Amino acid sequence: MRNTTEIRVWMMRNGHTVDSLRLALGHANHTPVSLTISGKNNVRTVLRHLLNLGCPPEYLYLPTDMTGRVE
């Protein structure tokens, strides 16, 4: 299960917000980012972006096809 609390703590400590992630990814609204962080969705671009920013993969509970991959 995705560790939403740890993801949000990591984001806060590193100066990231749902809106900053949304803007960086070019999404029109925050829904894909929020649903991915909460574990209700697995938007790969959001997960990849979090990984590339340095979010620990153990917080993200990555889908099997993404395990060990950072692009």
Image (spheres, rainbow, N blue to C red):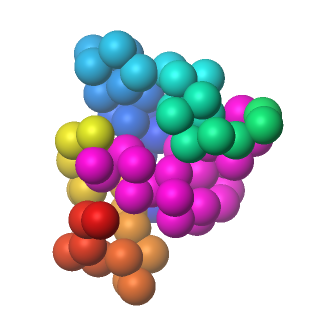
- SS majority, magenta: helix
Residue at 37%, 45% (x, y): give it: 50
Q: Is 67 drawn above or below residue 39 in the view shown?
A: below
Give the camera-side residue of 36 and 3. Answer: 36
Question: Quarter-wise, where is residue 66 in the image?
Answer: bottom left
Q: Position of residue 28 (x, y in %)?
A: 78, 37
Quadrant holding the C terminus: bottom left
Residue occupying the far bottom of the picture: 65
Q: Position of residue 41 (x, y in %)?
A: 65, 60
User: Is 22 positioned to the left or the right of 53 in the image?
Assistant: right
Q: What residue is shown at x 27% (from left), y 19% (from top)?
A: 14
Nearer the observer, 24 or 57? 24
Stretch in magenta? 30-52
Q: Residue 45 versus residue 41: which sits nearer the camera?
A: 45
Q: Is residue 20 above or below residue 29?
A: above
Residue 4 lies, with reference to residue 44, above or below; the image says above
Residue 59 visible to the viewer? no
Going by the image, does 18 lie left or right of 58? right
Q: Position of residue 60 (x, y in %)?
A: 38, 54
- Residue 20 against residue 53 in the figure, above or below: above
State which quarter of the image contains the N terminus: bottom left
Please name the residue shown 27% across and 16% down the image. 13
Q: Residue at x 67, y 56 (%)?
A: 40
Q: Is residue 40 magenta?
A: yes
- Give yes or no for residue 34 being in the magenta stretch: yes
Left or right side of 65 for 45 = right
Total marks drawn?
0
